């Protein structure tokens, strides 16, 4: 435990300390209580990021752009100390889209519209659903179920 961070152990102690502070009256002030709740909300955040990679034949510029974008997100999440997990596209699609009828991106559009009935997959000014929005919703759902 001293050599590495184990989130279950650290979070358990943090929750215990917060409850103890409340019992001892340190959180009777509304501002202190709101600060504690805000910290809990921030710790509860978790991000699932897709580890996308360029397709064969896309060239050096595309490869660089893909890697740089991924690196920016990883650096930002690390700097903000937001826990994240990265997943390859084939992993989440294999798990979530198993048994979903259709082919290609139509499967993620179907799953997203069924799982999140109020989701807006057709942006203003467009006639067709956008598979990027559907993929993002499916990736979030994967994060909830993983």
Image (cartoon, helix red, strand yellow):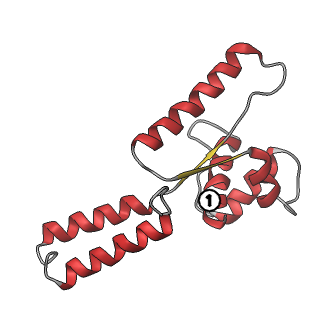
Residue placed furthest toward the top: 60
Residue shown at 20%/71% (left/top)? 33
User: Is residue 121 in view from this perspective?
Assistant: no
Residue 125 in picture, x, y percent from top left:
58, 36
Establish if 130 lies above or below 96: above
Residue placed furthest toward the left: 29
Residue 104 in picture, x, y percent from top left:
85, 45
SS class, disc 1: helix
User: In the image, 65: left or right of 14?
Assistant: right
Q: Nearer the viewer, residue 16 or 43?
A: 16
Q: Nearer the viewer, residue 129 or 46?
A: 46
Reading the image, the residue beneath label 1 is: 143
Q: Quadrant of residue 56?
A: top right
User: In the image, 77: left or right of 16?
Assistant: right
Residue placed furthest toward the front: 2
Establish if 7 lies above or below 125: below
User: In the image, 84: left or right of 21?
Assistant: right
Establish if 53 lies above or below 139: above
Residue shown at 52%/37% (left/top)? 73
Residue shown at 67%/55% (left/top)? 138
State which quarter of the image contains the C terminus.
bottom right
User: Is residue 117 in view from this perspective?
Assistant: yes
Q: Nearer the viewer, residue 42 or 4?
A: 4
Q: Nearer the viewer, residue 4 or 20?
A: 4
Residue 126 in picture, x, y percent from top left:
64, 37
Crowd class of label 1 (few under 14; some 14 to 19; many from 20; radius 10 Å): some
Q: Quadrant of residue 113?
A: bottom right
Q: How many numbered marks have been drawn onto this rendered protein structure?
A: 1
Residue 32 in picture, x, y percent from top left:
16, 68
Establish if 110 lies above or below 80: below
Residue shown at 25%/81% (left/top)? 20
């Amino acid at each position: 435990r001293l050599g590495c961070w184990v989130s279950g152990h650290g979070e358990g102690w943090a929750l215990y300390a917060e409850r103890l502070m409340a019992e001892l009256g340190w959180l009777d002030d509304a501002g202190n209580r709101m600060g504690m709740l805000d910290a809990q909300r921030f710790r509860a955040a978790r991000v699932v990021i897709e580890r996308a990679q360029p397709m064969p034949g896309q060239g050096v510029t595309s490869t660089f752009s893909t890697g740089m974008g991924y690196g920016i997100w990883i650096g930002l999440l690390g700097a903000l100390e937001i826990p994240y997990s990265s997943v390859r596209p084939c992993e989440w699609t294999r798990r979530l889209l198993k048994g979903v009828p259709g082919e290609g991106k139509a499967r993620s559009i179907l799953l997203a519209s069924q799982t999140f009935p109020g989701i807006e997959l057709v942006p203003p000014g467009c006639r067709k659903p956008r598979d990027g929005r559907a993929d993002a919703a499916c990736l979030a759902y994967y994060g909830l179920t993983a």
